[in-house]
Image (cartoon, rainbow, N blue to C red):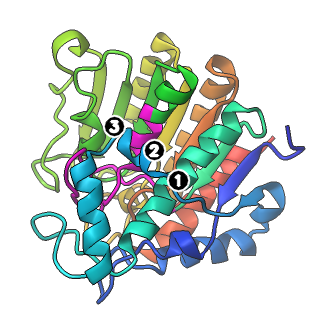
Amino acid sequence: MSSKDTCIYLGQALADYGFKDGHPFGPQRHDAFQTELLRLNLDRELVIQTPVAASHDRLQLFHTDDYIEKVRDYSVSGHGYLDGGDTPSFVGMFEAASHVAGSVTDAIDRIMKGEFRRAFSPIAGLHHARRHVAAGFCVFNDCGIAIEYLRAQYGIRRVAYIDIDAHHGDGVFYSFEDDPDLLFADIHQDGRTLYPGTGFVNETGSGEAEGTKLNIPVPPFSNDAVFQEVWPLVENYLRENEPEFILLQCGADSIKGDPITNMEFSPAAHAHAAAKLRKIADDCCQGRMLAMGGGGYNHENIAQGWTAVVDAMVKN
């Protein structure tokens, strides 16, 4: 293992995952985070890794062949939408989205081989895409790919997916709704007030998995006091179920001032989540933890929220 036990993925290949013409998910998000990471000298506590493209086989773990080929085709022309109107195509989209997914699976390889205990990828956490279609700015669902990859490559069944993005992680939830081994805990703005309109308290899984999932919708304008009130539900849930690997989707759009949501968490909430999950990972799964940036459309919030997560992951 490296003397530094956390790695991070940075580079133009990840920054390229961004939509054009003033779209809220623009290519500047990566640089906003990187600038703050360097300003705080957090890069000295990490090993920086170059982004890696996912192979077709890895994309295929979660997505259908037809959908993968559709993304490839639309990526050449850069015309049209991959969904009903939220996710426009752009030239080079396939390559950019492949680097998002591939960096996440590369991080898993490095963690599972003992090179690092933890990893962070800022342009990742694309939790809305389904197996056969894009959704909500998300082309390939790297979260779903990560879950399937951990199982196919390393035989890990009890994966914990924790999501504190303002939006419900519907692409993950519904893809594993009937899977009792996928631990799912999601704190998000009430679906009656925000896209995608899902993630209600009574959505706890289906079939054999009924009662195994944790959705925690909170009202618009919820602040850190609300976060601290509900967070113990997540901790208790994870400790009761003893995961083998922890995935954190730490979307910064739940921080006050985001232009497309109504949440009012502060970066301290994100730091708290990361610190507590790091402790659970150390106690339950040999420290194995991967954090993914997720949403966030206020660049200052991205910079502060994600560096707070990284700081919590590297602190001794």
Kindly report the distance in space between the C-alpha atoms of the residues bearing marks 3 and 2.
25 Å
> How far from the left and from the top, in percent, is residue 315?
77, 45
Pointer 3: what residue? 186
Viewer can see residue 268: no
> How far from the left and from the top, in percent, is residue 222?
30, 50
Residue at 74%, 46% in the rendered image = 6
Viewer can see residue 216: yes
In the rendering, which numbered label is found on residue 102? 1
Range drawn in magenta: 123-148
Q: Quadrant of residue 8?
A: bottom right
Characterize the local packing of mark 3: few (<14), some (14-19) or many (20 or more) Cα atoms within 10 angstroms: many
Question: Are circles 2 and 1 on residues that touch, CB within 8 Å?
Answer: yes
Q: Residue type at mark 2?
A: Arg
| N-term mark: 2 or 1 | 2
Tag 1, which secondary structure? helix
> How far from the left and from the top, in percent, is residue 162?
43, 36
Q: Residue type at mark 3?
A: Asp
Q: For marks 3 and 2, give the one nearer the viewer.
A: 2
Between 223 and 110, the residue placed more toward the observer is 110
